[in-house]
Image (tube, rainbow, N blue to C red):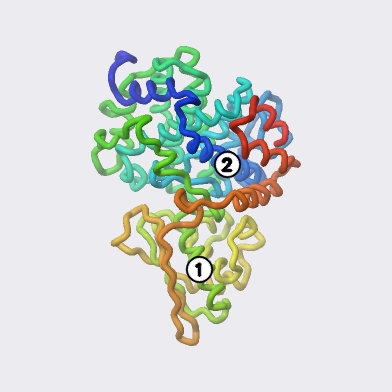
Amino acid sequence: MTDPDADGVAADLATFVSSLAAADVPEDAFRLTERAILDTVGVTLAGADAEAGGIAAATASDGHGETTVLGRDDRLPLSDAVFVNATAGHALDFDDVALAAMDGHPSVPMVAPLLAVGEREGASGRDLLTAFVAGFETQHYLSAPISPGHYEGGWHATSTIGLFGATAAVANLLDLSAERTAHALSIAASMPAGLKRNFGSTTKPVHAGQAARSGTTAALLAAEGATADSTAIDGERGFFDLYRGDGEPDLGALPALGDRWSILEDGIDVKKYPCCYYTHAAIYAAIGLADEYDLEPDAIDDVTVTASQGAADALAHDDPETGLEAKFSMPYLIGRAIARRDVGLAAFDAANIDEPAVQTVRRRVTLTVDDELAYDSNAARVAVTTRGGETYERTRERPPGTHDDPLSMDELREKFRMCADRAPAAVATDDTLAALSDLRSVADVSDVLESL
């Protein structure tokens, strides 16, 4: 085994993660992190009632344990609770994204481990926020040398990169030394998995659950003295080498940790709609056209949506049969946007998928690729032609709720309430909202979890 103190990606990253303290984190980063945790808890509550959330809970132990399961009356052993909560958090595809930072969903692999370990350790809200930032910066750091080739090659970065975010976040929360943090990250390098081929199935949410559980396990193993090769990330046949995609890993792209804060510069994008993020700009544009021109389903002759190759690769279900498939169907989502002017949680209920007005429009929607757009661009152009021969177009460069155009706190709270109402167990929504909105002031995260 190589020297754990040797120079390299794991050692450099471990130095940053292990030394990051609340005093080092900009206040604006704390505010963004509070929003991210609030949003993730909300979608987890709703996801507990989703198919994938229920399946994950059914595979867990017999319900006896010390760790809170969000939205349910159960308590589970820590590892099981992390898996169940993170799977539920991604079950509705309503959780946040950070495409500029890591081509995936940054919060969902980290929030479940932080809440579970924080509950066990009696951590403060500020402790959780600091650890979250450590994990977020880790995801950006490790994604930079292999993106976008990693994602284009078929890996689901929420799982493969998010795993390292969970590892770093838990390592920071546990106050592991730099040496043990380096081992934790190198242990994690043996654990990444998650195929984009499984988008649209109950396996996709499991990617988040396994990343959260594996990252927690890696940190806990290192805390107990487990070791790993120090070059497991950047060495020959290490993580970068094996998960790079078609291109060579660009180690020159590694950002300067602590000098440029990715959470502030690249940010977190909060989802307005509970479906694949590649569809959001098109949905927003379609609703705008339908409202402006009072479009009715029977009047639609043709709808053409032009988007990126990344969108086309992810959106594999033109004629979805399930709610999960519908989340990855541009025709269905545009059909609902025009027919109903709304794409909320109810849009993916089994009873609503075959709604006649929505299907009337869906059958007339075509997704095309603009080769001039970057592979992972979220821009979209929607062109609607009516039976009367009129054509209406609208282009949207970015989805609503991006880092530079965020949802308002009122919109964020409205989303949280919508999600909390779907939780299988009763939620003290007002108390939870108040605590999560000011997580910096919470002395013990266990107090927050009592209301969930």
Spatial CA span between label 1 and label 2: 27 Å
SS for callout 2: helix
Name which residue lies at 53% across and 64% down.
Answer: 332
What is the three-letter code of the residue carrying label 1?
Ala
Residue 421, given in percent of the width and then of the height, sits at 71, 49
Badge 1 vs badge 2, beta-carbon distance below 8 Å: no
Residue 412, given in percent of the width and then of the height, sits at 60, 49
Identify the image quadrant of the C terminus.
top right
Query: For residue 125, which quarter of the picture?
Result: top right
Q: Is residue 220 left or right of residue 46?
A: left
Q: Is residue 211 visible?
A: no
Residue 108, given in percent of the width and then of the height, sits at 53, 39
SS for callout 1: helix
What is the three-letter code of the residue carrying label 2?
Thr
Point out the residue furthest to the bottom here.
388
Of marks 1 and 2, which one's residue comes earlier in the chain? 2
Q: Taking 379 as reference, is 259 above or below it? A: above
> Which label belongs to residue 62?
none
Name which residue lies at 41% across and 33% down.
Answer: 137
Residue 372, given in percent of the width and then of the height, sits at 29, 61
For label 2, the residue is 40
Badge 1 crowding class, 10 Å Cα cut-off, few under 14, some 14 to 19, many 20 or more, is many
- Which of the two residues, 18 or 73, is positioned nearer the viewer here? 18
Query: For residue 287, which quarter of the picture?
Result: bottom right
Q: Is residue 360 visible?
A: yes
For label 1, the residue is 286
Name which residue lies at 57% across and 45% down.
Answer: 91
